[in-house]
Amino acid sequence: MKLERPAAAALILSAVLASCRGPAAPAARPAVDLAASAPATTAASSATPLEQRGYLLLRDGSLHIDDGTPIAGLHVRGTLRAGRLQPAGGVEGEGPLGEAGQPGWMELADGSFHGDQTARPPFRPYLRGYRTPDGEFRPSTRTVVY
């Protein structure tokens, strides 16, 4: 079989490029079951390895890992799981309750505030309260709606 010049050049070029690819990519690694491979929890901690004790700071809706240090301001403690809080109990800490501002609720799973004019009901668990003119949330009660 006789090859034309362009076809022969293309065949040679493809052979050269194939040899320049380097070693083959390593085989894909199987998925790891994090729950099975993580260390067991201690008796002092009831959280699984993928959970951490945490709290939601009510003034700004931020989530924090509970390291045992005192918490300034009103907050709700619970378990952090995948960046969301599962609260355990009511509002703790010192601070004023809300009586004025924009009425609404804070959803405790993610700390988001929704005004009463929002066109949907709150996702439980949540707290009723007010957003002040400076943007802080103040609950109107210490009781979480579960």
Image (spheres, rainbow, N blue to C red):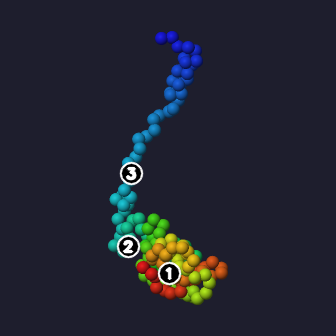
Dot 3 lies on which element? loop
- Where residue 31 is drawn, which disc sits there? 3
Tell me if residue 28 comes above or below residue 90 in the rendering.
above
- Where residue 127 is drawn, which disc sits there? 1
Marks 1 and 2 sit apart, C-alpha to C-alpha, by 27 Å
Graded by Cα atoms within 10 Å as few (under 14), some (14 to 19) or many (20 or more), the crowding at tag 3 reads few
Identify the mark nearer the N-term, 3 or 2. 3
Q: Residue at coordinates 34% horizontally, 73% vertically from top-left?
A: 43
Q: Quadrant of residue 125?
A: bottom left
**Image quadrant where one finds the C terminus:** bottom left
Residue 132 visible to the viewer: yes
Depth order, front residue of 121/124: 121
Q: Residue at coordinates 48% horizontally, 83% vertically from top-left?
A: 91
* Amino acid carrying mark 3 in the image: Ala
Question: Does 136 sit left or right of 25 as displayed?
Answer: right
- Where residue 45 is drawn, which disc sits there? 2
Q: Position of residue 29 (x, y in %)?
A: 40, 46
Q: Position of residue 129 (x, y in %)?
A: 54, 83
Residue 53 visible to the viewer: no
Q: Residue at coordinates 34% horizontally, 59% vertically from top-left?
A: 36
Graded by Cα atoms within 10 Å as few (under 14), some (14 to 19) or many (20 or more), the crowding at tag 2 reads few
Marks 3 and 2 sit apart, C-alpha to C-alpha, by 27 Å
Instruction: Please say if the residues under marks 1 and 2 sit with CB atoms less than 8 Å apart.
Output: no
Identify the mark nearer the N-term, 3 or 1. 3
Q: Residue at coordinates 45% horizontally, 35% vertically from top-left?
A: 24
Tell me if residue 41 comes above or below residue 34 in the rendering.
below
